[in-house]
Amino acid sequence: MTNEELWKAVLGQIELSISKANFITWFKNTLILNNQDGVITIGVPNGFAKEWLENKYNLYILRALKSFDENIKTIHCVIAPERASMVPSGDSLKNVDAIKPPESAGFVRKKLIEKPFFTATGSAAPAFHETNLNGRYTFENFIVAENNELARAACYAVSQNLGLAYNPLFIYGGVGLGKTHLLQSIGNEVVKSSPEKRIKYINSERFTTELVDSIKNQKVDKFKEYYQQMDLLIIDDIQFLAGREKTQNEFFHIFNTLYQINKQIVISSDRPPKAIPTLEERLRSRFEGGMITDISRPNLETRIAILESKIAERGFIIDAPAIRFIGEHITQNIRELEGALNRVIAFSEFHKISPTLENTEKILSQLIENNKKTIQVEDVFRAISEFYGVTKEDLIKKGRKKEISHPRQVMMFFLRTELQAPFSAIGEILGGRDHTTALHAFEKINTNKETRARLKEEINTLKDRLYYPA
Ligand code: ADP
Ligand code: MG
């Protein structure tokens, strides 16, 4: 077995035991450089991958290696970016390398435009002139925990190595989990270390509005030229480009220009590229060609850590049992957590009371009650239609097309779990179907979500959307 074959086999095994996002992030562009006396030397593209492979994935790698060759004792990683980027990767990583820019492309550089064509508007937060960055989001005040460490590491690596570490970088996760915070941190970090860089942060809705305006004013070329001279382009909440063909088309050209000259592109979304309906295939494959990492919900321990850090940041003191109470009751996301904390602080200051457990319970009782917001059948229709890009009529209609039957089954699942509707009523709501159909759909989704990571994510995102419409 050659080193190349061995590594390919090992990657094949590892891929089965970790998430796709992790796999691509950490194992892309790796190879075995040497295999001698039981020591395997792995070439990796950068220091981050080295640290991660040696510390986090050491056991996975070693276990897989040993299953092919019992004599293998240890691994160590060396940074070998030139070698590593020429890796003929394993099958699952193949398309990742398909759009590498030609070697010489890095030297092409467009003339910089002196004045920004567009100015930032619409944001109440303080922003540095045209970058749209908000200085309050930094890596320093971002709490790292298991739900976000991968995303954080990838963002940090990008900020240290614009265009070279991971490009594009795609971060996805539910509402209020820290995507914008991380994206902005990259920008702020680069402003600090390389103030000469051209940086633009924009959300995809704003991007679309600017584009539409530029079309109206016959300034599309200027619009494109402006974006194509960025060193770092950050597009937040790209899912809003769904269904906007014209915007996707212009964005695709901007993306390609930047990508070919090794400029950094960072994108966020509430779901992985595959799950964005009506995203053009060519854009999807571009996104999938880079790094994709996710942020998931924080557990109780993390929620408490975040609260503690925010309390310290504010120079405030809250009793530990009260902090725990907040963490236990505000579980959906970090934005809500901050909101609850702000309320406790403001209320205690205003009424000059100390935030004991008892007072905190009182202060938050209304909020916690509201959080148990009841949802209606129409809310479920709305969330499902928006998420899957299908209409209410599609869901009700007869027919078993996969594009519709899956959303319909998920809808049945939610009607059961969130509304506790009887199966007969669920069948009735979805176009007079039989109660056994509803029962089977529920059971299918309920079982599959335990074993299929993607479905589980889908369910979580949808649940967010149900209770926190965009
Ligand atoms: P998203 O863009 O995913 O909807 P945001 O980035 O806007 O979420 O985060 C919501 C709020 O929670 C922001 O105020 C952000 O600063 C805060 N936040 C999120 N994650 C963290 C974290 N890990 N550490 C500290 N603050 C966080
Ligand atoms: Mg956001």
Image (tube, grey):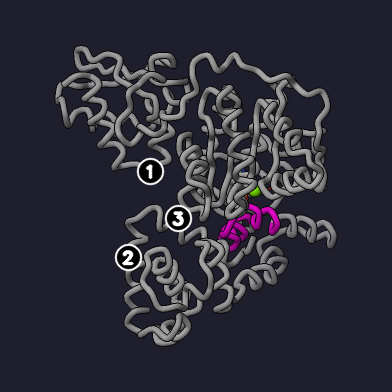
Q: Which residue is drawn at the image coordinates 79% and 47% (left, top)?
A: 216
Q: Position of residue 376 (x, y in %)?
A: 58, 78
| Residue visible at 61% across and 16% down in the picture | 108
Pick the front one: 463 or 373: 463
Residue ID at (40%, 53%): 454
Q: Which residue is mark 1?
A: 19
The answer to whether the residue labelled 2 contacts the one labelled 3, judged by CB atoms less than 8 Å apart, is no
Q: Which residue is mark 2?
A: 447
What is the magenta range?
323-340
In the picture provided, is 230 more to the left or to the right than 463?
right
| Residue under numbered circle 3 | 457
> Looking at the magenta stretch, what is its main secondary structure?
helix
Mark 2 and mark 1 lie on one chain; the one further toward the N terminus is 1
Res 135 seen here: no
Please name the amino acid that badge 1 sits on: Ser
Q: Quadrant of the C terminus?
A: bottom right
Report the amino acid beneath label 2: Thr
Q: Secondary structure at mark 3?
A: helix
Q: Is mark 3 within 8 Å of ligand 1?
A: no
Q: Residue at the spot x=72%, y=30% of the render?
A: 225
Q: Quadrant of residue 141?
A: top right
Q: Is mark 2 within 8 Å of ligand 1?
A: no
Residue 446 rendering spot, x and y as whole percentages: 36, 67
User: Per the image, is 324 magenta?
Assistant: yes
Residue 64 in the image: above or below residue 206: above
